Image (spheres, grey):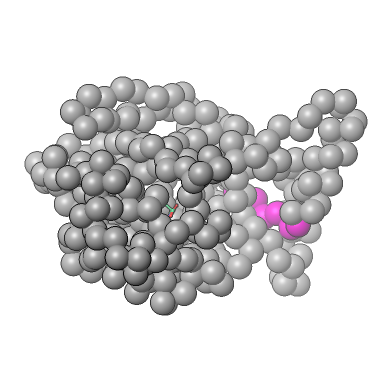
Amino acid sequence: MASAPTDSSRPVFRFAPSPNGRLHLGHALSALTNEALERRFGGRLLLRIEDIDLTRCRPEFVEGIGADLEWLGIRFEPGFRRQSQHFDDYAAALAKLHQQGLIYPCFCSRQEIRNAAAAREAEAGQSWPVDPDGAPLYPGLCKGLDSGEAERRIAAGAPHVLRLDMAAAIAASGRPLSYEVFDADDVRHSVPVAPERWGDVVLARKDVPTSYHLAVTVDDASQGVSHVVRGRDLEAATDVHVLLQHLLGLPTPLYHFHRLLRDDGGQKLAKSRDSQSLGALRDDGISAAEIRRQLGFT
Ligand code: GLU
């Protein structure tokens, strides 16, 4: 496995929100943790807008992110990368995986996947495995599809995703992979990856020619990110990213997973659950200094 860049240049950190809603306290925690570690290590802090979801991401949310981060007083390097402007980069990565025979088109709907999983469950008399996010593993319905038949369906305009053949990808990687986790004192420990628990993940969606996993992997490398600081909710997904880095010949950054904020019901804060936005807190008269204090930053 390639190690994190260790040249004399400064460590590179990034905060990478998706503009599909207003930022909430959980984002503030993530951005502030990035800032604190970046300062401690004398690094650079980049902003990346993860806007591959062209239906849910909106320009006003991009503006909102800028306004909220400025209000919090977090200084990023000028300019930012927008994933929607880099679809060609993701296509190039897909082509590389295609050449290695590691991806295949899949025409299944979510419902078909659920039905197939339920049928296998009934047949085997035991529960069908789910991924770390709780979704049923892809039961491989399109995996054995004749390539001529797949091409015919694609030519006819059938909606499809591209999936990673996980077993083949792990075999191609050749040996057990791992990555290093760092803490605020730069003490590191190695973590083995188990990407098989995700099954044949989607690398290009029906509506956009990439997916979260692929875009984040390609971009961290393109931006020279050496230190990825993200919430614990993305710890398991890191296994897929490390596998992709290996297959694409990209370096593996160091990782740090920060705690998650929970609401009163114990649920992780999320845009989809209308967690109180930073904008609403600001309108209520709360200062950025109070937010920093509340989250444990001075
Ligand atoms: N865009 C992702 C999110 O908002 C985070 C990116 C990452 O750290 O991989 O949850």
x 33%, y 48%: residue: 30
x 60%, y 32%: residue: 197
Q: Quadrant of the N terminus?
A: top left
Seen from the viewer's position, the closer of residues 199 and 73 is 73
Total numbered badges shown on the rendered structure: 0
Looking at the image, is 89 positioned above or below residue 37?
Answer: below
The quadrant in which residue 127 appears is top right
x 86%, y 27%: residue: 124
Looking at the image, is 228 positioned above or below residue 54?
Answer: above
Looking at the image, is 69 positioned above or below residue 103?
Answer: below
Q: Is residue 144 left or right of residue 15?
A: right
Residue 298 place in picture, x, y as percent: 17, 45
The quadrant in which residue 259 appears is top left
Residue 196 place in picture, x, y as percent: 58, 32
x 34%, y 69%: residue: 283
Looking at the image, is 59 positioned above or below residue 20?
Answer: below
| Magenta span | 103-109
Residue 281 place in picture, x, y as percent: 36, 62
Membership of 105 in magenta stretch: yes
Q: Is residue 77 left or right of residue 62?
A: left
Furthest-front residue in this view: 285
Membership of 148 in magenta stretch: no
Residue 75 place in picture, x, y as percent: 17, 60
